[in-house]
Image (cartoon, rainbow, N blue to C red):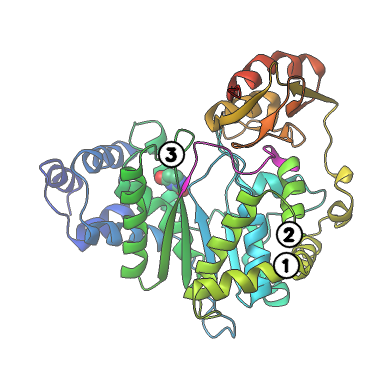
Amino acid sequence: MVPQWIIEKKRDGGALSEAEIRAFVDGFTDGSIPDYQMAALAMAIFFKGMTGEETATLTDAMMRSGDLVSFDGWPRPTADKHSTGGIGDKLSLMIAPLAAAAGLAVPMISGRGLGITGGTLDKLDSIPGYDTRLPIGRFKQIIADVGCSIIGQTDRLAPADKKLYALRDVTGTVPSIPLITASIMSKKLAEGAETLVFDVKCGRAAFMRTREDAQALADSLTRVGRALGRKTAAIITDMDRPLGRAIGNALEVAEAVETLRGEGPDDTRTLTLELTAHMTVLGGIHPDLETARTALATLLDDGRALDVFRRMVAAHGGDTRVIDDPSRLPQAQAIVEVNAASEGHVTDVDALAIGRIVLQLGGGRTKTDDAIDYAAGIDRLVQVGEHVQAGQPLMRLHARDASLTERFIPDALAAVTLVPRRN
Ligand code: URA
């Protein structure tokens, strides 16, 4: 197999054979195909696309580049969800324990945040003692004991994706549906869950800005999942506005705990129930979505989902006292209220602007090795449809010092659109 012939075939719009795709991925993983040839192929795929069959083969080859976690013979059905990432998206923290409380086994391997998009691992790292770097054997033991576990990606899980993503990041080839599909799915499939539910975010702070692009990614993810023998569903959700009222790692853990208590903002609770309902229906726990929503709401309201979360945190070595007393989570030195300059109806809260503020307050990273301030972020954020009086708070900013919080007050005011009531 001559690598340049494969590149030329894709460059000219041809469909690659299974043998060609596997040879290329294997050669790239073991280093016999250099980065520059993989980058050229990625660019050819970016321009010419891939058929569903090619995308499934690419995904399978990348998945098989490392270890595969297996739950064969387990008594409970296995399921996971994946979100393409958004502002204030702390749903994994509720969905894993809720789905486990309903009877699923949930193996969840999550990532860190980059840019404005937060990552579940950073949120968990803000819980003192919680260890996200457990070996796969311990991960499986916790799932057997508790019902769910959330850890970080290991070097042995889909290593071809790790290498390829780093290359795509610096060669302008990230926004390609076949490449995104193979990247997301190779990791999720290697994790071993039989059912995968996708939350594809759409809007100004999402990876996919338009409904058409989000739908195309959702279709590609579900198609490839089914082609490779998994049960899949995808829903497209809004990312023009932040999810919930808290954005920032420790602040989001506090809001997740509130939601697990049966409280929390409506949008957060509703989407938690919706995504988990798809998991439990596909996983065979509930017969239909309506039954699932009702049963899952009870598990949130009666504390059973919170109990699973508590046991998961304990099994990972985390300090469970943060659940009863959120003041034990990392706390910012400076907290400032941002108050409305005039009375008005909230008609918009710009998720992109909010994400950028949180990043600059110290709550995110611009490079993968940047340090992060777990306490930084925004809470008590107003939501669309609410009414505020002049002088009432729109949100609170949290950061390590007052000069930082003060600096972002004008941006925070600009992120919220208030329309005065007409008399
Ligand atoms: N997330 C991934 O894991 N991979 C992509 O290519 C894009 C988003």
State which quadrant residue 375 falls in: top right
Q: Position of residue 361 (x, y in %)?
A: 69, 24
From the image, tell me which residue sits under label 1: 305
Instruction: Give how far apart the Cα atoms at labels 2 and 1 are.
Output: 6 Å
From the image, tell me which residue sits under label 2: 260
Q: Earlier in the sequence, mark 3 or mark 2?
A: 3
Crowd rating for badge 1 (residues with CA inside 10 Å; few <14, some 14–19, many 20+): many
Q: Could you tell me the amino acid type at mark 1?
A: Ala
Q: Is residue 245 magenta?
A: yes
Q: Could you tell me the amino acid type at mark 3?
A: Phe
Q: Position of residue 344 (x, y in %)?
A: 64, 24
Label 2 element class: helix
The residue lying at 42 percent from left, 59 percent from top is: 234
Q: Earlier in the sequence, mark 2 or mark 1?
A: 2
State which quadrant residue 302 falls in: bottom right
Would residue 308 be visible to someone looking at this image? Answer: yes
Q: Could you tell me the amino acid type at mark 2?
A: Leu
